[in-house]
Image (cartoon, rainbow, N blue to C red):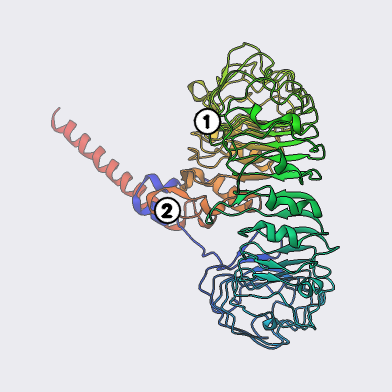
């Protein structure tokens, strides 16, 4: 379209030629997944007519449906997933889902159910997941048993259930998951457990079990058992004798008092087979090597927030342990974890240590098989990091040192860990003293997080040696003069696929700044101060996810629209976009390419003032000279000609009178 030629003449011409049309969004929003709709929290009392018959996944929570009957969802016969969380449902009538043969999951969480008809769940050929959490159920007889033969998971948490005794005709042949957390169950009998013969995942968190009938779990096999919040763990461990459990959760919670554990209370572990155990937030009384006497068969041990200051040395029989979590404890030095007692460790987590953690020297050298090490959020400070501290960790692949105190990185600072694939240093102030790269020997590194590290981004050699780097996060690091120049620290990392440069206070990007990054598929430049001209630097990229949200983009020139067209997804939200005829080419392109635009709800006009806050997708401009415009223009030209004629005559008359 041509520019709005009449707008410079008269205000009335602007109003005549630059019309605005807005469109209302539908009440329910379509999500990215096909045939998935979200109608949550809209105050709806029925299914809106605008919802397509082909809907398969429907999120309808936080509306108002006091009764649900066979006409409520009769039109949506293709439903696979239905979420009715907190819809004030009291009654579920007969044959409510009789025509919904594909329905797989029903979520009724948070509804004060008074009545469910015996045939209310009839219809679905393969109903597998039923959520009745926080519905006021006090007796399992309340649940209609018809058509539950294919049920795989039943969620009954946060109710008033005191017994898990199922009705005799309750179908359990395919039931794998039962969630009873936060009920009033205090005793478990052999009959209860025998009725759940096929169940492999049981959750009793928050019930404070006080008794288990001897032999109730004898010869039973479980993938996951949870008894969190139980005051006396010895009751649980004795009750689980002769069982086989892959994951046993015995921790407690923030809103309960820490429990003191003694070695005697843990003796029951010796009479069962457990692969993984969680004891978070307990307090060990008299912590000694004897405490671990029944842990010898474990592969994973979680001691998060157990008030530990050290682990006893000389522990024996822990050669099976592969994963050890010691997060949120109070170690002063890394050597206090007695790493030599766990020679087979592959994963070690000491995250969020409550005291300033000294890495010491060679504290982990016996962990030759270590693959993952998380030391984040532990106030670690080391002026010379990290070869002495990480000595002999040649198999380490993931290292997290984020959210710590300043670290000094020397030349080849991670020489002891040549197999690193992921290195996270986010929010840790890095002092790079050597002119060469501290990462230059990390040829296998694929992910590097350097966000908010106060880096010297003018060091062009900082990333040298990272031949296989795929993901680089530089969020929050500033560049000199707010400019990313042609020669920059990104030159050595030609394999990059994801680059994050958000919140870097960037004002401009040189056209050649990314010229060697031809493999990039994700580029985040959000929360900077860039203008539309920065798009010039992306001309060689195709099929890229491009995030330009929250910048200073007013107008995007027509010559740059081809570059945007060749990208896969673009986010331009929260920019001060111009919605006048000066930007008509971009606005037209935007509305024709909505399928590749992300954050359209936040992509709004900033000018002119009367369009501020209007979604760009809803704006229509007419930027030609209309008939009204032509009329006013002709009137203006006619008056101008008459004015010139009279002016000419007056000048001639004045000259003749003064000869």
> CB atoms at circles 2 and 1 under 8 Å apart?
no
Return the residue at label 1: 504
Secondary structure of the residue carrying tag 1 is loop
User: What residue sits right under mark 2 in the picture?
Assistant: 611
Spot occupied by residue 378 in the image (x, y as percentages of width and height): 57, 33
Q: Position of residue 24 (x, y in %)?
A: 51, 65
Relative to 329, is 100 above or below? Answer: below
Q: Residues within 10 Å of mark 1 (few under 14, many from 20)?
A: many
Total residue callouts: 2
Quadrant the C terminus occupies: top left
> For residue 243, which numbered disc appears in the image?
none
Determine the image quadrant of residue 220.
Answer: bottom right
Judged from the image, the secondary structure of the residue bearing numbered disc 2 is helix
Q: Of circles 2 and 1, which is in front?
A: 1
Give the Cα distance between marks 2 and 1. Answer: 30 Å
Q: Is residue 236 left or right of residue 231?
A: right
Image-based side of 519 in relation to 634, left or right:
right
**Residue 638 drawn at (x, y percent):** 34, 49
The first of marks 2 and 1 along the sequence is 1
Image x and y of residue 100, in percent: 75, 78
Q: Nearer the viewer, residue 555 or 422?
A: 422
Is 72 rendered above or below residue 502?
below
Q: Is residue 1 visible?
A: no
Q: Residue at x 82, y 59 (%)?
A: 243
Using the image as rendered, state which of residue 203 and residue 462 is in the foreground: 203
């Amino acid at each position: 379209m041509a520019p709005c030629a009449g707008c410079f003449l008269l205000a009335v011409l602007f109003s005549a030629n630059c019309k605005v049309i807005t469109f209302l969004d539908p009440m329910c929003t379509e999500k990215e997944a096909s045939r998935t709709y979200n109608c949550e929290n809209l105050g709806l009392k029925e299914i809106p007519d605008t919802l397509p018959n082909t809907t398969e996944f429907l999120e309808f929570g936080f509306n108002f449906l006091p009764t649900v009957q066979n006409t409520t969802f009769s039109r949506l016969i293709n439903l696979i997933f239905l979420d009715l969380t907190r819809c004030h449902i009291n009654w579920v009538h007969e044959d409510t889902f009789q025509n919904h043969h594909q329905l797989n999951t029903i979520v009724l969480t948070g509804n004060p159910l008074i009545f469910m008809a015996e045939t209310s769940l009839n219809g679905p050929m393969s109903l597998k997941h039923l959520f009745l959490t926080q519905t006021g159920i006090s007796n399992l007889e309340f649940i209609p048993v018809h058509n539950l033969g294919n049920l795989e998971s039943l969620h009954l948490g946060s109710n008033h259930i005191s017994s898990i005794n199922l009705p005799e005709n309750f179908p359990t042949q395919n039931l794998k998951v039962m969630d009873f957390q936060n009920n009033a169950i205090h005793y478990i009998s052999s009959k209860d457990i025998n009725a759940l013969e096929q169940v492999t995942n049981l959750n009793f968190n928050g019930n404070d079990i006080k008794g288990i009938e001897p032999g109730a779990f004898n010869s039973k096999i479980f993938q996951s058992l949870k008894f969190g919040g139980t005051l006396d763990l010895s009751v649980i461990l004795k009750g689980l004798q002769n069982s086989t459990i892959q994951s046993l959760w015995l921790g407690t919670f923030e809103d309960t008092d820490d429990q003191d554990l003694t070695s005697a209370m843990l003796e029951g572990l010796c009479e069962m087979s457990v692969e993984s155990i969680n004891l978070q937030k307990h307090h060990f009384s008299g912590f000694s090597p004897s405490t671990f006497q029944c842990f010898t068969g474990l592969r994973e041990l979680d001691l998060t927030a157990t008030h530990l200051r050290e682990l006893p040395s000389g522990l024996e029989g822990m050669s099976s342990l592969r994963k050890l979590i010691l997060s949120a404890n109070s170690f002063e030095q890394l050597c206090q974890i007695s790493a030599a007692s766990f020679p087979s460790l592959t994963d070690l987590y000491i995250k969020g240590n409550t005291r300033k953690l000294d890495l010491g020297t060679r504290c982990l050298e016996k962990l030759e098989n270590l693959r993952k090490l998380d030391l984040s959020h532990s106030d670690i400070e080391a002026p010379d990091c990290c070869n002495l501290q990480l000595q002999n960790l040649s198999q380490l692949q993931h290292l997290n040192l984020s959210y710590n105190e300043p670290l000094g990185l020397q030349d080849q600072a991670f020489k002891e860990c040549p197999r690193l694939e992921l290195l996270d240093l986010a929010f840790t102030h890095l002092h790079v003293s050597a002119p060469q790269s501290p990462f230059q020997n990390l040829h296998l590194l694929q992910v590097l997080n350097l966000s908010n590290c106060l880096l010297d981004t003018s060091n062009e050699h900082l990333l040298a040696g990272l031949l296989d780097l795929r993901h680089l996060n530089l969020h929050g690091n500033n560049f000199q003069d707010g400019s990313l120049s042609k020669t920059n620290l990104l030159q050595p990392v030609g394999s990059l696929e994801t680059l994050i440069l958000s919140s870097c206070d960037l004002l401009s990007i040189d056209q050649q700044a990314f010229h060697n990054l031809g493999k990039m598929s994700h580029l985040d430049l959000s929360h900077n101060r860039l203008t539309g001209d920065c798009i010039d630097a992306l001309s060689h990229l195709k099929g890229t996810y491009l995030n330009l949200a929250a910048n200073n983009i007013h107008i995007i020139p027509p010559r740059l629209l081809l570059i945007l067209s060749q990208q896969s997804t673009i986010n331009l939200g929260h920019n001060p976009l111009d919605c006048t005829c000066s930007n008509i080419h971009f606005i037209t392109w935007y509305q024709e390419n909505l399928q590749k635009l992300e954050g359209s709800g936040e992509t709004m006009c900033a000018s002119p003032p009367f369009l501020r806050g209007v979604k760009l997708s809803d704006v229509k401009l007419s930027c030609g000279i209309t008939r009204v415009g032509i009329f006013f223009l002709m009137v203006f030209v006619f008056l101008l000609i008459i004015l010139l004629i009279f002016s000419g005559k007056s000048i001639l008359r004045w000259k003749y009178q003064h000869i």
